[in-house]
Amino acid sequence: MRVQGGGRGEPVLMLVHGLGATGDVWNGWRTLLAERWPGRWFAPDLPGHGGSAPLDQYSFTALAASLAELVDSDRPLVVLGHSLGGVVGLSLASGEFGFQVDVVVGMGIKVAWTDDELDRARTLAQRPITWFASRDEAAARYLRVSGLDGLLRESEDAVSAGLREEDGRWRLALDPLAFAVGAPDMAGLLAAARARVVLARGEHDQMVSSAQLTRLQPSAVTLPGLGHNAHVEDPERVLSLLEPYLVAGG
């Protein structure tokens, strides 16, 4: 797996991106983490994303198992995951992987799915890889698929991490089969989590409503003025959800 990180010591912070993105969506956090996070942090590319190898079959448990291999079981672990990454974080907190997760922050998790939405996801999973004649075309598609259009520039390294070039043609690094991961059993995941859980969303997130989150967790947080990719829009406000762990006045 491709993993980026920094810092040293504990607690350890795992940053998990959403479907279609890569660990590079956390690049804007580097300076902030150096100032405010007291321990080590790392940001993997999920299997089938960026520079990480694909899986034969995608499930939340399989994705969590892949990330579990990166965890030092002797150090306190905090997980902050966006969308799909938040679900994977909840899966890691089940206690089934041989280590304790202290806190999971799930940001922008889509918790309600219609049959039509699931059918569309299964259809996307079966589509062949699309090749593009230029990097610009592939980058534009990557930004749309990852929901980062308007938040990152096509020329940025964080976009390049989501692309692959072969023989002068370009494609997304994303394995289309990852779309078939399905809908999470949020009630079950929350019941099984052996960690403090914080569910959060941006005020303008069209993927999940405040009402949907508060039905699952009455204390769920809505961050004013932000959208689905709140962690890219305003890293400092999203990091503030981990306030008890942060260095004061960093």
Image (cartoon, rainbow, N blue to C red):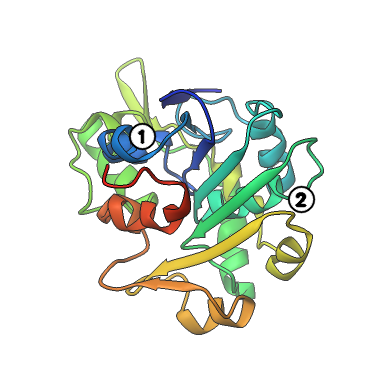
Image location (x, y in percent) of residue 121: 57, 58
Residue at the disc numbered 2? 94
Left or right: 192, with 150 as reference point: right
Q: Mark 1 points at which residue?
A: 24
For the residue pair 37 and 186, the one nearer the viewer reads as 37
Question: Which residue is situated farthest in the front direction here?
Answer: 248
Position of 236 relative to 26 (above/below): below
Residue 142: which quarter of the image?
top left
Q: Quadrant of residue 206?
A: bottom left
Tell whether 120 sits left or right of 201. Answer: right
Mark 2 residue crowding within 10 angstroms, few (<14) / some (14–19) / many (20+):
many
| Amino acid at circle 1 | Asp
Secondary structure of residue under mark 2: loop
Q: 70 or 34, which lies in front?
A: 34
Residue at figure coordinates x 63%, y 26% from the top left:
70
User: What percent of the width, then of the height, locates residue 122?
Assistant: 62, 56
Q: x, y percentage for residue 46?
A: 55, 36
Q: Residue furthest top?
A: 167
Q: Which amino acid does label 2 sit on?
A: Ser
Q: Dots 2 and 1: beta carbons under 8 Å? A: no
Q: Residue at 64% of width from left, 74% of height from top? A: 115
Could you say which is closer to the camera, residue 213 or residue 179?
213
Q: Residue at x 74, y 45 (%)?
A: 61
The quadrant of the picture occupied by the N terminus is: top right
Tag 1, which secondary structure?
Answer: helix
Q: Could you say which quadrant of the image residue 173 lies in?
A: top left
Instruction: Name the N-terminal-most of marks 2 and 1.
Output: 1
- Quarter that holds the C terminus: top left
Q: Is residue 50 above or below residue 184?
A: above
Q: Nearer the viewer, mark 2 or mark 1?
A: 2
Tell me if I can see residue 201 in this picture.
yes
